Amino acid sequence: MKKNFFVLVGLLFSSLGGYTYGYLSVSDSLDLHPREHYAQEARLMTQILTTYHFKKLELDDSLSSVILDEYISTLDNNKSYFLQSDIDSFEKYRGELDDLTRQGEIEVAFEIYNLFRKRFNERMQYVREVLLDMEYDYTMEESYNTDREGARWENDEAGLNDLWRKIVKSQMLSLKLNGKEKEGMRETIAKRYKRFQRNIDQYTSEDVFELYMNTVAEVFDPHTNYFSPRTSDRFKQNMSLSLEGIGARLQTDNDFTKIVQIMPGGPAEKSGLLKENDLIVGVAQGVDGDMVDVIGWRIDDVVQLIKGPKGTTVRLEILEAETGVNGAPKEITLVRDKIKIEDLEAKSEVIDFSKDGRNYKVGVIKLPGFYMDFDAYQNGDPDYNSTTRDVKRLVTDLKQQGIDGLMMDLRNNGGGSLAEAIDLTGLFIKDGPVVQVKTSSNKVEVGADEDPEVIWDGPMAVMINRFSASASEIFAGAIQDYQRGVVIGEQTFGKGTVQSVIDLGRYIQVPEGEKVGQLKLTLQKFYRITGSSTQHLGVNPDISFPSAFEASEFGESARPSALPWDQIGSARYELVEDISPQLIVRLNDNFRNRLVTDVDLKELVAETNELKENLARTTISLNEEKRKHEMEEAEKRRAERVSLSGTKIDPEGKTGEELVLDDKYLKEGIIILSNVINSIG
């Protein structure tokens, strides 16, 4: 995944027509310059990073080189604004940014940004004066690759002109195929670029400083970040667990804003209109507001458009994950709502089914995160919310209903309180270590369960996926290491680091009316009780399900600056041994057999393979007939899957199951758990 600033605009979802339509002036405005106190912030940040960061890196010439490359990439990730001569002119700074930043001299960052904005304005002028009025030949055999990471920088203006011709042609073709007339196409794209120009024009010195200092921070590791005062306020709001919006976690992926998690209880989940890996390409306010193209936008700017007061309407234009970049855009409408802590709480259900002549009753607990209401706890509220307390109550209720086995569903669980992960593990083991934490001074501390009570000692499974991270990896890893339960699903995210936020304003005096930002700093690292770090490796399941997400693209391993995997000494612990290695072998053999015979599993494999292909597909045709065919084929495949998903399992089939669930991953996980029940129950 690649971070970006403002890259290619509207690559394939609209077209770009001509005429000015009140277009903003693209003449160069005044250059931006650093404020006086930025020098103090830069000096303080570099001192903290080199002294206290877990990695213990020196800010030297090699890091200076990385900072330069990453900053250029942040501004122009798709190589569509800068010329090769511009990149060559920056070379004189390759070995100097370390010394300059350490001394608080960050004028170079503004120099590079100001040249970027000049090139941006030149591109907008070319779009306005030439490309909006161009007649495009849609019978030509040519294509455009939306991912230009491996492309070269253009040598001259002619090369950039041809690149942007393809960009605009792609946009025009998309609108044409969606029924727009020529005049409507031009008007739509003119408005889109007008908004894009306005977005750039509103950029301030604070924004540029944040871009640069965050680049410096992220060369230490991807979870070390600089927050400007404005971003700091948003970060605090996001930590409150009381958010007003659509209830989805977003992430930048190439030029797009991608849905990476649907939050339980939010409008997105309740509507069923958004899914993980859908791409948001436009945002509109109310029932009739103009659709704003957000391709290439910074993630926090997209979030600001989507968030809003409870009860208000937001419309999104999306590309569904099922059809990918070659699919047709789809507009959906959501009503914003407040996502409260109770919407993120653990929830349970009981699933009854029969298989091979035996009836089963399985309890499923869905756990979106590891949470604790610290304020209520400190105020002495006996009913304060916490993951462990809630799961204990749910398990007690499930036991009263006579369950045969328990499934803990941690898919898309991004983590949270480490203390809760330790305490939750303690509900299922007698006592002992759960996690090891190493500090930047190489001191190792053990987080242990000291409560001998076991709330559930029966057959157990844990479901994970690529987006299970941090504290959820600690829980799943401990259950696996103790051989207490079988772990099912995908390899997890691999985030094995711990961060703390430092308010830089505590150490800097600035003029009245000015504010300084915050530094989120990696200080510790997680290790399993075996001594293996969860960094990069995460948790590998005992039974691996089909996955569309490669570690190199989705997860900690996708970030070059991520801390490495390593290993320390094992903690002392006693195995529970409910899940023996021999049982894991039998479960995998059974799963492989079902891959051949089970209808739902075959469909799941096909869906996963197609999603993987869609995620990898970045080249789009600029030939009208080919593009139309690609869109029709993508929609046909989506419709076929929708039809198949409503098909019930034939009770006369080879497997003889009567378990019918729309969630194919959960269904297969429960079947595996039923095999565990037969073996140890």
Image (cartoon, grey):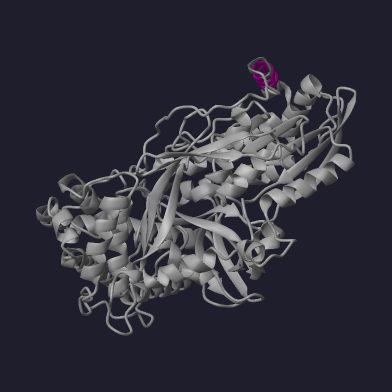
Q: Position of residue 281 (x, y in %)?
A: 49, 61
Q: Is residue 3 above or below residue 490?
A: below
Q: Position of residue 635 (x, y in %)?
A: 60, 48
Q: Position of residue 144 (x, y in %)?
A: 36, 49
Do we see residue 634 in this rendering? yes
Q: Position of residue 515 (x, y in %)?
A: 34, 76
- Residue at 26% x, 72% y: name it: 125
Q: Quadrant of residue 396?
A: top right
Q: Is residue 324 above or below residue 612?
A: below
What main secondary structure does the magenta stretch of the protein show?
Answer: helix
- Residue at 21% x, 50% y: name it: 59
Q: Is residue 354 above or below residue 496?
A: above
- Residue at 84% x, 46% y: name it: 397
Q: Quadrant of residue 386?
A: bottom right
Is residue 590 part of the magenta span, yes or no?
A: yes
Number of numbered discs on residues: 0
- Residue at 50% x, 41% y: name it: 493
Is residue 639 part of the magenta span, yes or no?
A: no
Q: Looking at this rendering, what residue extends furthest in the left direction? A: 92
Viewer-closest of 240 and 550: 240
Viewer-closest of 598 and 356: 356
Q: Quadrant of residue 535?
A: top left
Do we see residue 146 in this rendering? no
Q: Quadrant of the C terminus?
A: top right
Span colored in magenta:
584-592
Q: Is residue 187 left or right of residue 60?
A: right
Viewer-closest of 638 and 218: 218
Q: Is residue 660 left or right of residue 96?
A: right
